[in-house]
Amino acid sequence: MPSASSIQGALADGVRALARWLGNWWRIVELGVQLLTLALTPSSYGAEYRRTLLRHIYLGTAPSLVWFTVLTTLLSLVVIRIVLVTSVSYGLTQYALEMVVRVLVLELIPLTAALFAALRCTIPSATEVAALRSGGGWDELLRARSGPMLMEVLPRVSAGVVCALLLAAISCGVTLVLAYFAVYGFTTAGFPAYTRTVGHVFSPGVALVFGLKIGFMALAVALLPVASVLIGRPRAGSSAELQGLVRMFFAIVVIEGASLVGNYY
């Protein structure tokens, strides 16, 4: 039987771990508010910052756009074909299009876009910030009063948000077009029925949840990897990058679960 002292020690360790966990999340929230304040301040948008922002948005989004569009097109064609064949075999053809929209557009595409943006844009950006801090470049920028939060962090986070939102928007549009052609073929005769079905799926409540889901996922994948590096110790080889991945996946799971509850309960 464990002694009372060992139980008290385990409880104390658990309380300290919970306090550290909550403290880290609070520091991430503070960092997010600081970046939001910088983003909403008109004086931040000087010529140098605009050039830096546009460069990061281009480098973070353009290389991923074509590949992700091709990937989601192939994935959408496979899923649409499976759903259509299954619906026909069970005599549920009238529900095929609605199922395609719900499965792909509402659930899979936003999640895939967020993860792809994290892998191709935000996680490499977090690695660059970690290298800047561990190599002493961060302190040099502070001494030179160049504003590393403005010139190094905010452009990378903004590029991550733009990348995730753009990938999700384009992929959802491509999937809706593919779903129409797969169900009705190359004709405009099915357009009224198609718009009616899509409008039925995207009711006001579902559309609101869908927009919030994409926005919060984009914010999570853009902010959490970089924020975890900034709140961790500035040394190379630390576990801050891994902790950022864990926090990012945790946030994505929470957002996905909340969207499922909002859409279907």
Image (cartoon, rainbow, N blue to C red):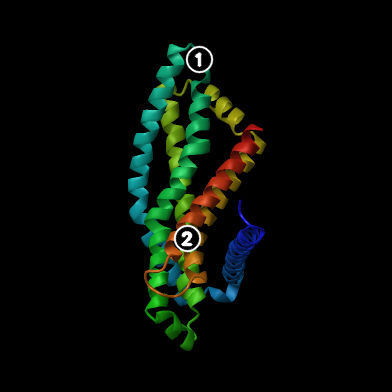
Tell me residue 134's x, y (percent).
39, 76
Mark 1 / mark 2, whichever is N-terminal: 1
Tell me the quarter of the image containing the C terminus: top right
Q: Residue at x 49, y 51 (%)?
A: 249
194 vs 15: above or below: above
The reply, left or right, for residue 8 in relation to residue 55 is right
**Residue 13, label in figure:** none
Q: Residue type at mark 2: give it.
A: Gln
Tell me residue 220's x, y (percent).
53, 55
Q: Residue at x 48, y 11 (%)?
A: 91
The reply, left or right, for residue 250 in relation to residue 132 is right
How far, Cα to Cα, is label 1 from label 2?
45 Å
248 vs 45: above or below: above
95 vs 152: above or below: above
**Residue 92, label in figure:** 1
240, 43: nearer the viewer: 240
Q: Nearer the viewer, mark 1 or mark 2?
A: 2
Please tell me whether mark 1 sits on a helix, a strand or a loop. Answer: loop
Asked whether the beta carbons under mark 1 and mark 2 sit within 8 Å of each other, the answer is no
Tell me residue 135's x, y (percent).
37, 79
Q: Which residue in the protein does label 2 denote?
A: 243
Tell me residue 5's x, y (percent).
64, 62
Report how many numbered discs are placed on residues in the image. 2
Q: Residue at x 43, y 85 (%)?
A: 140
How crowded pointer 2 is (Cα within 10 Å; few <14, some 14-19, many 20+) is rated as some
- Is residue 191 visible to the viewer in this orientation of the structure? no
- Is residue 196 visible to the viewer in this orientation of the structure? yes
How crowded pointer 1 is (Cα within 10 Å; few <14, some 14-19, many 20+) is rated as few
